[in-house]
Structures are given as structure tokens and as C-alpha cells.
Amino acid sequence: MAAAVVAQRLDGLRDEPRSGAPRIIEDARIAAVIVRTLESVPPDATHWSSRGMSRARGLSVSSVQRIWRAFGLQPHRLETFKLSTDLDFAAKSLPLARTGALDRSQPMRPMREAY
């Protein structure tokens, strides 16, 4: 390796071809799976499943799973927050939050009146 770097200078640092089968799925199809996963939902569900995406994009289930894993996509984990429409929601939830937080963080301490 050192001789290749000395003889070829910067070109000697390039990777040589590796063994294994060449990739079958083109970059455009991978990008289409990513875009569709992030920007749409299926008509009959709340998020994409690997089976649903494979049917929609014409790929195998394992290919969809590999793409999602490579790009860190987890469509089944929703990152949304829904606020209650109840007008008294804050007043109702504050006492519960205070006692619940105290129960979890300091279970040995006695309960006392919140200020």
C-alpha cells in the first residue's frame, strides 16, 4: 500500500473495487422511498409500514427495511404532539403532573401541598 501511495501520489489513496454484487437499486429509487416516507402517509393508515411501502414503490420488503435502516427512518415512531381541546385541560392536568412527578422522582419523601 505504501508503495502505491508513493508511486501514484493522491490517486494511490482511492479505494480499489471491492468484492460482492453491485447495487441493484438506483439512487433515484432510494430517494423516492425516502421522500415518500417523510412527506406522505398511506391512504389507509397513519404511517408507512415496510410492506405498504414495498407495494407502493415496487421493491422488496427487505430492501425498504435496509433503506430505512441506512437513513435512520422509523415511520412507526411518530414525533407529534396533540394538545387537548378541553378548555380546562391545564387546570385539570396540573395537580396530576405535580403529584405524578413527585411520586416518580422522590418516592420516599412524604406528599405535601403544592404551592
Image (spheres, rainbow, N blue to C red):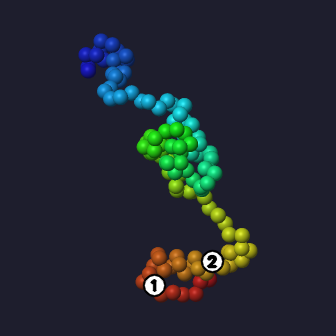
Q: Decide which of 79, 7 is in the foreground and name it.
A: 79
Can residue 75 be seen at all in this image of the molecule? yes
> Can you say whether 84 is above or below 9 in the image?
below
Q: Secondary structure at mark 1?
A: loop
> Where does the image place residue 2, in percent across and percent down from the top left?
26, 20
Q: Is residue 43 left or right of residue 67?
A: right
Q: Tell me whether circle 1 and circle 2 mark residues in contact (CB < 8 Å).
A: no
Q: Residue shown at 31%/27% (left/top)?
A: 19
Residue drawn where x is 52% and y is 56% of the image: 77
Residue located 68% across and 78% down the image: 91
Residue 36 at x, y percent in the picture: 59, 42
3D distance between C-alphas at marks 1 and 2 = 20 Å
The crowding category of the residue bearing disc 2, from other C-alpha atoms within 10 Å (few below 14, some 14 to 19, many at least 20), is: few
Task: Identify the mark at residue 94; answer none if there is no mark.
Answer: 2
Q: Decide if residue 34 is in sight here.
A: no
The disc labelled 2 sits on which kind of residue? Leu
Q: Residue shown at 52%/76% (left/top)? A: 101
Whole-percent x, y for residue 115 in the image: 62, 83
Judging by the rendered image, the residue that carries numbered circle 1 is 109
Instruction: Give the residue type at disc 1.
Output: Arg
Q: Is residue 18 above or below residue 96?
A: above
SS of the residue under disc 2: helix
Q: Return the mark for residue 97.
A: none
Q: Is residue 36 left or right of residue 12?
A: right
Q: Position of residue 13 (x, y in %)?
A: 35, 21
> From the viewer's perspective, is residue 32 above or below residue 97?
above
